[in-house]
Amino acid sequence: MKLTLIGAGPGDPELITLKGIKALQNARVVLYDALTHPDLLDYCPDDCVKVHVGKRFGKHSANQDVINYMIVEYAMQYGDVVRLKGGDPYVFGRGYEEVEFAAKHGIESEVIPGISSSYAVPALAGIPLTSRGVSESFWVVTGTTKSHMMSSDLMLAAQSTATVVVLMGVHKLPEIVEIYTQLDKLDEPIAIIQNGSLPEQKVVTGKISNILPLAQICGIASPAIIVIGKAASLPDHLNQCVQEITQRNL
């Protein structure tokens, strides 16, 4: 019996790895999340059993305990099962929990990493998480812990000069703003990227001082990624440089 854990990437179906595609092409059963692109299921054989077990904030079709038992049941019934998860399954994807549960039931696992939305989505929006002279490191923090509270690590991250990426944190935006406000970082650049890597991608940029009304006006909602730090303003700087060059050449 075997569990194959596949990272589907940030959303765009072309951003899954070749190894992930090959695993889907041989799949007998696939348990897939809400954030995985439906086109990826086209790689599966016609007789493959496809089961939606997606979880989104406030809308769970199956809780984690149920998913764990489903993995075991399908593995025992079919001999192997594929678990398709958005982004990278080991970056806030609870992939290790599934591998651990499978191991306790005598099921071996293979992990096929995926492109994490934590760095891919900002890159596709023109935001480098590190850039010489701007940011020397980056933090990736979850906006929703097991207790549904904001991670206490955000306060530590906010005190650094690093670029801070918050996943699953749009509903915690007022709390995030409050943390940076307490640190007197009202001018800190911030960007929110909704539906990153997809045609309907939406990007809102601003500062800690004005991001709340901007996000409300633009109707920002999950799924979205928040990027905070000087690097978040680099796309605007680049656009300004392009405009200046264009004007000089007119």
Image: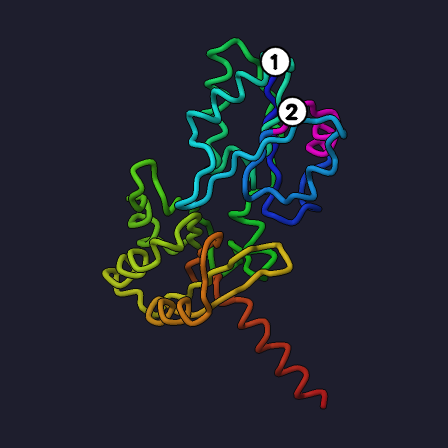
Residue drawn at the location 42% of the way across and 63% of the way down: 190
Residue 83 is drawn in which quadrant?
top right
Q: Are marks 2 and 1 in contact (CB under 8 Å)?
A: yes
User: 107 and 210: which one is in front?
Assistant: 107
Compared with 133, 70 (above or below) is: above
Counting from the top left corner in percent of width and height, residue 78 is at 65, 15
Residue 236 seen from this side? yes
x, y percentage for residue 173? 35, 58
Q: Which residue is mark 1?
A: 77
Amino acid type indicated by mark 1: Gln
* Residue in view at x 50 percent, y 14 percent: 103
Q: Give the side of residue 43 with respect to residue 232, left or right.
A: right
Q: Which mark is residue 29?
A: 2
Q: How is the image coloured?
A: rainbow
Residue 204 in picture, x, y percent from top left: 48, 67
Classify residue 79 by image quadrant. Answer: top right
Quadrant in which the N terminus appears: top right
Taking the image as drawn, is residue 141 in sight?
no
Q: Which class describes the residues within 10 Å of circle 2: few (<14), some (14-19), or many (20+)?
A: many
| Numbered range of the magenta stretch | 19-30
Q: Position of residue 206 (x, y in %)?
A: 43, 70
Identify residue type, mark 2.
Answer: Val
Q: Residue at x 55, y 37 (%)?
A: 33
Task: For mark 2, give the secondary structure.
Answer: strand
Q: Residues within 10 Å of mark 1 (few under 14, many from 20)?
A: few
Rounded to the nearest angstrom, the CA distance separating label 2 from label 1 is: 10 Å
Q: Earlier in the sequence, mark 2 or mark 1?
A: 2
Rendered view: 232 above or below 52? below
- Does the segment drawn in magenta span residue 27? yes
Q: Is residue 13 magenta?
A: no
Give me the residue at 34% from left, 54% from top.
172
